[in-house]
Amino acid sequence: MKRFFATIFALIAVFALSVGALPELGTAPFDPAYELTLSCTDKSYFAGNEIYVTVSVSDITPIAGLSFVSFRLYFDSSMLTPIVQNDGGMNDNFAALLTKCPDSKEWECLGKLTGDYYELSAMTSSQKTAKDAGSIEFKIGFTVKDTAKGLMRFVAPHTYCTAYDYNMYYELQGKGADLSVAEGQKAVTLKDGVSAAFDGDYIVVTAQNLTGSQFKNYFTGTVTLNTSSGSAASSSKAICTGYTVLVDKKTYTVVVMGDINGDGKIAMIDYVKLKRAVQNLDKLTGAYEKAAHITGASKIKLVDYIRLKRYVQGLDTLLPN
């Protein structure tokens, strides 16, 4: 039986298109015997990850059902490496791609990989034909190359979608499909080991005299840094408490530990303001109050004032919050 269907498979195959641009979907047949549906496990792809395309057979029209279905799936070989490779004609590797059929004991899968496309067929010689939508499915995996960029496309052209009904009298035409998958955008976050941390709506920085450029380099992607007045922050000047940073469409307020007056420096005026807050003579709020939590306690205490004063006098170092 395998030899018989392998002969059919060879007869319907044509010379491959040259590797490069993917072919167009083409003109759909007037009365297709079935339709293909392409879907992806993920809405977007990321370099280095795996991606899986499901090819499902639906809208089967022959009353007796289909006993043979064949198609080509083209992919961009500059972006993807197929997981299942040719196995010297044994066909064992391709059998795993047929993930759904009317009867796994009666159906088999033949396939080959050529350049930038898979050519796959599912078939049976039994009466257990495919009649229902989704009764035949293939799941085809790829590894996304590190250099992959832009829109990723998969195409199963109409012209290579063929089938036979149970009687095997006439070759029938199927309707192909295509699929586009967008490049994913990895979330921007703080790099490991930097002297900063997210804290609710704040980013608390424990490094001192950190320039705008150095602070932006703390992140895994592009961020927008503004002063407390909303203007673009300087790349060469020290960041200040009260600055804002836009990270993945969310705005955080910058807290520089010890910079209580928001001038980017830690000086006598800061511990004076902290002392007045401890004595209830002044009230610190928002980022400026958070910058006064030198020891990391939930409330401002006398020990925070002492630690900050000793730091300014060069007698102590600030503890990370």
Image: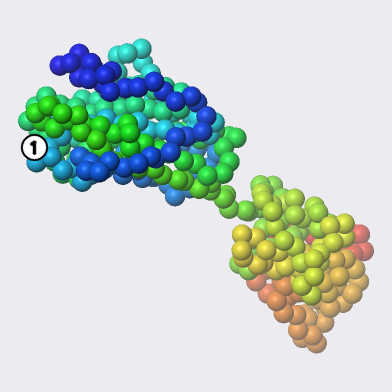
User: Can see residue 139?
Assistant: no
Residue situated in front as seen by the camera: 242 or 78:
78
User: Can see residue 248?
Assistant: yes
Q: Residue furthest bottom?
A: 281
Would you identify the image quadrant in which residue 247 lies? bottom right
**Residue 94 locus on image (x, y percent):** 31, 24
Q: Considering the image in quadrants, where does the C terminus appear?
A: bottom right
Q: Residue at x 87, y 77 (%)?
A: 272
Residue situated in front as seen by the camera: 24 or 42:
24
Image: 53 above or below 4: below
Residue situated in front as seen by the camera: 35 or 91:
35
Q: Relative to residue 14, is residue 202 drawn left or right? A: right
**Residue 77 locus on image (x, y percent):** 50, 30
Q: Residue at x 84, y 78 (%)?
A: 273
Image: 190 above or below 302: above
Task: Give amino acid for label 1.
Answer: Ala
Image: 254 above or below 286: above
Q: Residue at x 58, y 34 (%)?
A: 146
Q: Relative to residue 38, is residue 241 drawn left or right? A: right
Residue situated in front as seen by the camera: 203 or 305:
203
Element under label 1? loop
**Residue 297 locus on image (x, y percent):** 67, 68
Q: Residue at x 13, y 32 (%)?
A: 165
- Can you identify the residue that label 1 sits on? 64
**Residue 126 locus on image (x, y percent):** 9, 27
